[in-house]
Amino acid sequence: MTATSGNLLHDVPVHASDEVFTDLLQWQAAGRVRIERIVSNSQASPPGFWYDSPDDEWVLVVTGSAAVEIDDGTVHTLGAGQWLHLTAHCRHRVAWTDAAQPTIWLAVHVTPVSAPSPSPSPSPSPSP
């Protein structure tokens, strides 16, 4: 299980003659995609609590700040514009969120691709 991070507001082309499209993250998905807004007001995960989601999760801090701790001890401190991709079953917890202002997150939850399903059997030919 891994976590990848980046910043939406870094490396912004300011004098491009055309719009610039940049892939932030790509992954194969099947099933459900859920996008949610989370507002944290100085909350953190309870001591000893770990999220362990069966879905991939991509989170972006829109305003405020927060720290997300991975169960390997890595801590990702995120501010406005910074994002984090957590693969399915990447155990993590919210270590802290901004006490001075609300932390607004944009979270995208994606069901990972499962094993390929068998091809459907061909339909029987109609009888003559």
Image: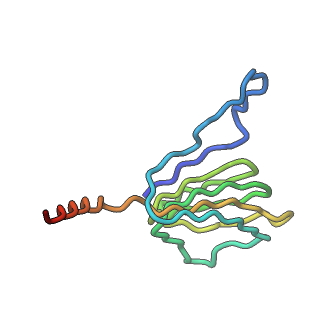
Q: Nearer the viewer, residue 65 or 53?
A: 53
Q: Quadrant of residue 125?
A: bottom left
Q: How many marks?
A: 0
Residue 117 in the figure: left or right of residue 47: left
Q: Residue 93: x percent and y percent?
A: 58, 68
Residue at image point 64% right, 74% down: 45
- Could you tell me residue 25's position as x and y percent? 54, 45
Which residue is the extreme one toward the left?
128
In the rendered image, the quadrant that contains the N terminus is: bottom left
The image shows residue 11, relative to residue 37, as above or below, that is above
* Residue shown at the point (45%, 56%) measured from the top left: 29
Instruction: State the image coordinates of residue 109 (x, y, percent, origin top left).
Output: 56, 63
Q: Nearer the viewer, residue 52 or 71?
A: 52
Residue 22 against residue 91 in the figure, above or below = above
Looking at the image, residue 95 sits to the left or right of residue 63; the answer is: left
Look at the picture and state if 6 lies above or below 101: above
Please name the residue shown 53% across and 72% down the image: 51
Residue 128 location, x and y as percent? 13, 63
